Image: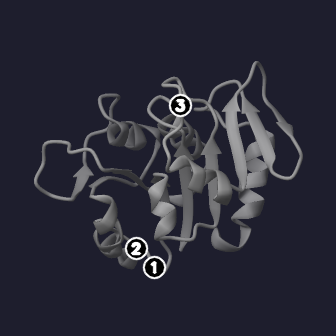
Amino acid sequence: MAIIVVGGGGRGAGKTALICGLLRALPERHWTAVKITTHAHGGDESIYEETTAGEGTDTARYLAAGARRALLVTSDEGELGNVLRPILDEHARNGRLILESNSVLRYVQPELCLAVSTSLAGGDKPSFELVERCADATVGLGGHDHAIEGARIHFHLKSLERISPTMLAWVREKLRDRLP
């Protein structure tokens, strides 16, 4: 199983846009994209599968970007591990998951964790500290595509929905053993 986690400081950070960029950059991998939230979305079920591609919801955007499946998981923080278990079990052998969440890092150990460093809402969520500690790289908007090497690589992208060739090569290398 290959798991990518994308976390961010809050609403408007660009997490969904980055996931859509990754889905477009890696279309041959047939990803299942999962948005995880603690906010109620009107349904009674804790796992909802989106079936219509579009721009109306984050999960519809995932499908439009090329996800094989798009799921919305709604769970209280304390129940998230139990709610995720069927999804993780289903994808255990050869599955490929991209998870949009900060708190999911308490329940999974991804092959790749990306922290989106731009937030339009100001003030980071407390759960973002977990993402910052676990992140393999940070990603943010920049005037042009470039990467800054350091203790942790930082990718500046002109658009979060378009992964630069440098970042794509880095992602492929990180996932090399998990993406035959």
Residue 78 location, quadrant: bottom left
| Residue 92 badge | 1
Residue lying farthest right?
149
The answer to whether residue 126 is visible is: yes
Please identify the quadrant where the C terminus is shown: bottom right
Element marked by disc 3: loop
How far apart, in angstroms, are the residues tagged by discs 3 and 1? Answer: 36 Å
Tell me residue 127's x, y (percent): 50, 51
Frontmost residue, 99 versus 178: 99
Q: Is residue 103 left or right of residue 131?
A: left
* Crowd around label 2: few <14 · some 14–19 · many ≥20 (10 Å): some
| Residue 176 badge | none
Q: Which residue is mark 3?
A: 123
Tell me residue 29's x, y (percent): 55, 59
Amino acid on which disc 1 is placed: Ala
Tell me residue 99's x, y (percent): 47, 55
How far apart, in angstroms, are the residues tagged by discs 2 and 1? Answer: 6 Å
Judged by depth in the image, the label closer to the viewer, 3 or 1, is 3
Q: Is residue 66 left or right of residue 52?
A: right
Amino acid on which disc 3 is placed: Gly
Q: Which residue is mark 2?
A: 88
Residue 173 location, quadrant: bottom right
